[in-house]
Amino acid sequence: MNILVTGASGFVGQAVCAQLSTRFKVSAARRSAATTPERYAGITVGPTNQATDWTSALRDQDVVIHLVARVHVMKDLSRDPLAEFRAVNVAGSLNLARQATEAGVKRMIFVSSVKVNGEHSLPGQPLTEESVPAPSDFYGVSKLEAEIALRRLAQETGLELVIIRPPLVYGPGVKANFAALVRAVKGGWPLPLAWVDNQRSLVGLDNLVSFIETCTLHPQAAGQTFLVSDGNDLSTPELIRRIAQAAKVPSRLLPIPAWLLEAGASVLGKREAARRLCGNLQVDIAKARNLLGWLPPCSVDEGLRRTLAGGAMQ
């Protein structure tokens, strides 16, 4: 089987290429002539948008795993951020899918995001694939629009489309908020989160790669949308304790009421960040288990151990 991975130099892309190359011929599509491991066929395609020419990259490919996306930008200076998200995540993905069908590609794995469903779930009511989409930011909106456009194309062409919506992904080399939390725990910072009573789903990098591989091969995955996680939801204080255990340092949790944390965060303009720490975001992976027989191969504790052993995080 020949597999094309877009976004091959990214956090998830590198892990996908490393795993799948043990069984298949993997081609790594890249934006520029950046370093690509010698064991992969590196193909430079330039920026992903509606004008990208994928001809050389798609030649003789059986499956495309599409990981390229414009993600959250901390300081977005664009005059029209939604248009920028749409250019890459919607038009760029649809352009790739169209060219893939013309090239004879059988299956496309589109890695979307739980943000299609929104930022929160009700207590005790995990999100499922049947939950009404409720994106709350431009990234989530663009991912939902991409899903809709790709499904329409798949129905018209017979392309076997598989959509995967992961929550926060952690693993060696993780950056952004999760890396900041790890640094805070390892640095011994007191965190006022001991009284937070929530449940959040995460997915370790190894588990996400395992699920992508399953969706690449399993005949029942065609035409389906899946939520994926570690299958072991954690409260924020429990996550902090497990990070501390993996780092072999004490956890320093202070008992501050969640409502007070959110109130203080609102004053500082950090209300959404506080809601992510204090609120619920659970996903139900029963469909992945029942339809594909998939079980997360890596425990949360092992995933955290691998994350911290993976080197410095930015």
Image: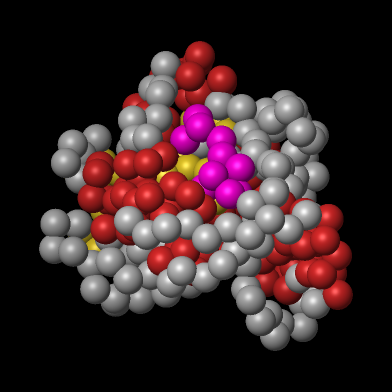
Q: Position of residue 282 (x, y in %)?
A: 65, 36
User: As drawn, is 214 to the left or to the right of 274?
Assistant: left
Instruction: Please say whether residue 9 is one of the residues in the magenta stretch.
Output: no
Quarter of the rendering containing residue 152: top right
Q: Does residue 231 appear to the left or right of 124 in the view shown?
A: left
Q: Range of the magenta residues?
A: 230-239
Which quadrant of the structure image shows residue 13?
Answer: bottom left
Q: Using the rendered image of the protein, determine whether residue 46 is visible from the camera's viewpoint.
A: no
Who is closer to the viewer here, 40 or 170? 170
The residue at 38%/50% (across/down) is 245
Q: Main secondary structure of the magenta part?
A: loop
Q: Is residue 237 magenta?
A: yes
Q: Is residue 289 left or right of residue 59?
A: right
Query: Image quadrant for the C terminus?
Result: bottom left
The spot of residue 93 in percent (x, y) is: 56, 54
Q: Residue at x 66, y 81 (%)?
A: 75
